[in-house]
Image: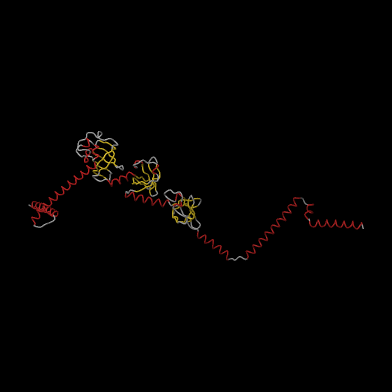
Amino acid sequence: MRGSAIILVIVCAILANCLSFTYNPLKRFSRTFKPSKLHMVTSVLEKQKTLGLVKQRYIGREDLSSSKDESDDIADYSYFAEADDEEIDPPKKGEEVTGVIIEIDENGALIEIGGKMSGYLPVKEASLSPIKNINTLYSVGDSITGEMVGTLKGMPVISLRSAQLVVAWQEALKVRAVDEIISVKVLEVNRGGIVCDLFGLKAFIPGSHYTGTADASLIGTTLQVKFLDANEEEGKIVLSQRRALLDNQAADLKRGSVVSGTVTGLRQYGVFVELSGGLAGLLHISQISVDRIESLENLFTIGQKCKVMILDHDKTNNRVALSTKVLEPNPGDMLRDMNAVFAQAEETARKYHERLEAERLTRETAALGIVAGLDDSISNLSGNSVDPLVSVADSIESILASIVSNNTVNSSK
């Protein structure tokens, strides 16, 4: 009995060792192999497992690919061919480009110019006149046409200023040719003068051609000006406000009108007077008074206010002839009481014009009387009433004819 139990224990131990060897082969190998070799075997087994998964996936895709129609490959190819056909050659510098605005930001606008190509319109190239944002002039979806002026990171840069520049110069030269008065907006004031906007072009008004005081308060205002000079090649435009004022005033300057002025210069031959608007006139010494003048310095001072009559105005050279002699109520009043002459200038001028008109009518009446007398003589001779002017002309022609005939007869003798 006790021997059977011992035998049973031994058998169980043998069976346990056998089972341990069967289900744990790595333990057996671990007894005979080193740890590094054991790790290598483990890696090989893991790689075999991964390879098996890849094969399974490949087989699955191969099954799916076997069901794909060959026409799909043809369709894909045609799609890429169509996309290739839509591609266009990039524009060259100086070429005209037309596109549609697809996006606007604070720095510019993105332009679709065909196919898969886009261009960029910077803010500074969108207009000749300075702007802060393109959306003040254009919106998304607007079509624009400009010139390719360069590239930015491989993208064509489009400019609208170049085309606008050509149009602006055409307008400027047209105005200069006809010498018209135009309006400009003041952009900047500096020591030399005033910078203005003319059709988007920058123009300059020298300080000597502005009648007032140029300061920052002028910025944003509008001035009436005329051209002094324009050079398209140099991009230079020079304007004059003084010329525009002179032309405006010239329209009001008529012979015989009385105007106010300021004495600006004294010479031996006369006095220079600046009229309102900056127009200069000459009061010649012979037109100051009926009486003889010994010294102009004793009569006038620089800056003195006065009143004068316009005798003549040369619009071509902007020269004005003035007179105070015709404003004297009595001969020599300019030497005795100049201020009284200026105070009565308008009234004296009115009487002066009335006297001139009366003298003109007297001369015309006398002329008509002479013509009428000739007409009576001719009518008595012919017994017919004729136009006096025609009769006088005929009489003169007959006299000339008789003179010619007499000379001919004498020469023949």
Q: Position of residue 327 (x, y in %)?
A: 22, 40
In the image, taking residue 156 as reference, residue 42 lies left or right, namely right
Q: Position of residue 188 (x, y in %)?
A: 40, 43
Q: Nearer the viewer, residue 100 or 47?
A: 100
Q: How is the image coloured?
A: secondary structure
**Number of marks:** 0
The quadrant of the rendering that contains the N terminus is: bottom right
Q: Position of residue 388 (x, y in %)?
A: 13, 54
Q: Nearer the viewer, residue 411 or 356?
A: 356
Residue that extends furthest to the left in the rendered view of this protein:
413
In the image, taking residue 51 as reference, residue 108 lies left or right, namely left
Residue that extends furthest to the right in the rendered view of this protein:
1
In the image, taking residue 319 as reference, residue 143 lies left or right, namely right
Q: Position of residue 361 (x, y in %)?
A: 17, 48
Query: Which corner quadrant of the image does residue 74 belong to?
Result: bottom right
Is 191 situated above or below 71?
above
Q: Nearer the viewer, residue 31 or 361?
A: 361
Is 383 situated above or below 251?
below
In the image, taking residue 370 as reference, residue 197 lies left or right, namely right
